[in-house]
Image (cartoon, helix red, strand yellow):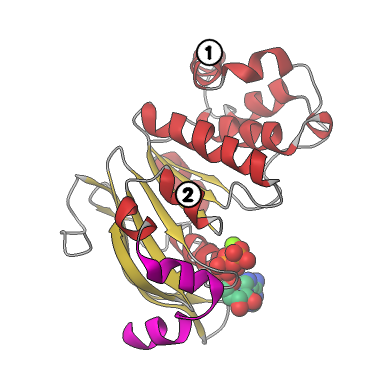
Amino acid sequence: MSSADPASPALALSVRGLVAGYSEQPVVDGVDVDVPVGRVVAVAGPNGAGKSTLLKAILGIARLLGGTVHLEGRNVTGLPLQKLARLGIGYVPQVEEVFESLRVGENLEMGGYLCGKRERAHRMERTLGVFPQLRPMLQRYVETLSGGERKMTAIARVLMLDPRVLILDEPTASLSPEMSRIVLHEQVRALGTIGKSVLLVEQKAIAALEVSDWAYLMVRGRVVMSAPAPEILHDPRMREVFLGGAVAELAEQAR
Ligand SMILES: Nc1ncnc2c1ncn2[C@@H]1O[C@H](COP(=O)(O)OP(=O)(O)OP(=O)(O)O)[C@@H](O)[C@H]1O
Ligand SMILES: [Mg+2]
């Protein structure tokens, strides 16, 4: 898929040759990723593979050392997060994604701070249409929620920005296997159903791939496999990547 023209408007997000890190030393080393409009695309990989760094580089947070990022055909390389949010990208970070001391409803209101009262109310209804489970929780403080409910609040808060593209960094981090399944199978799937373009980074690769159209497997800062998600899901090398066996070999091949 990475052979497609990065400036094509059929691609919600297109990353080419991305090199990034936190110093001169690259952590992400020449990564191509495409998210077609309306699709869910997963980047899976073990701890420390550089998945969060890839997202942070796309979002102007990590240090960009090379490569380009296009949003719906427009070159947005290196633009800061605020600007990208205005252009239609919603980002749900791996941690600290909600205000604990506020109620669920207040968190959603804050997500819609950029728009007027009427539009905010409209977006609130639409968001509760996607996650109806949140309606009876609007008055509850986030600190009283379960991990999965909290993550739903975080995603809903970002939906209040009315993004066309959602970037989710490990939405199942610190959740139980049961809760992780709910977040991926119900919440992420719901985003795909309403036509959002989603870039999903996950360490829980199997569940992530089950809800994705396309997947990239990332190891040591490089993409080692890129294929329709069901194909990667059934590729024996994937298991090995997560068990450690094939890491060195695949990383070498990607060079
Ligand atoms: N702020 C930082 N400063 C310096 N190095 C960092 C920083 N954040 C991450 N790194 C390093 O970059 C590498 C990739 O980290 P990254 O967080 O991108 O991995 P990841 O694939 O998201 O892992 P995980 O699945 O555990 O979240 C790691 O070696 C990590 O120690
Ligand atoms: Mg991470």
* Residue at 52% across, 86% down: 24
Q: Secondary structure at mark 1?
A: helix
Instruction: Using a 10 Å C-alpha cutoff, classify the residue at mark 1 as few (fewer than 14 neighbours), some (14 to 19) or many (20 or more).
Output: some
Depth check, front residue: 17 or 151: 151
Question: Is 212 placed above or below 218 here?
Answer: above
Disc 1 CB within 8 Å of nearest ligand 2 atom: no
Q: Quadrant of ligand 2?
A: bottom right
Q: Secondary structure at mark 2?
A: helix
Q: Amino acid at mark 1?
A: Glu
* Residue at 44% across, 34% down: 189
Question: Is 96 placed above or below 19 here?
Answer: above
Quarter of the image for residue 134 reads top right
Q: Which residue is mark 1?
A: 125
Question: Is 39 placed above or below 41 here?
Answer: above
Depth check, front residue: 57 or 116: 57
Q: Which residue is mark 2?
A: 208
**Residue 96 image offset from top left, x and y in percent:** 71, 48
Main SS, magenta residues? helix
**Residue 42 image offset from top left, x and y in percent:** 41, 53
* Residue at 62% across, 18% down: 133
Q: Is residue 63 visible?
A: no
Find out whether residue 245 is within the magenta segment.
Answer: yes
Circles 2 and 1: CB atoms closer than 8 Å: no
Mark with earlier residue (2, 1): 1
Question: Is 115 placed above or below 24 here?
Answer: above
* Residue at 77% across, 16% down: 139
* Residue bounds of the magenta highlight: 235-255
Please give left or right for residue 88 compared with residue 201 in the image: left
User: Separation of disc 2 and disc 1 at Cα?
Assistant: 28 Å
Where residue 247 is drawn, which disc sits there? none
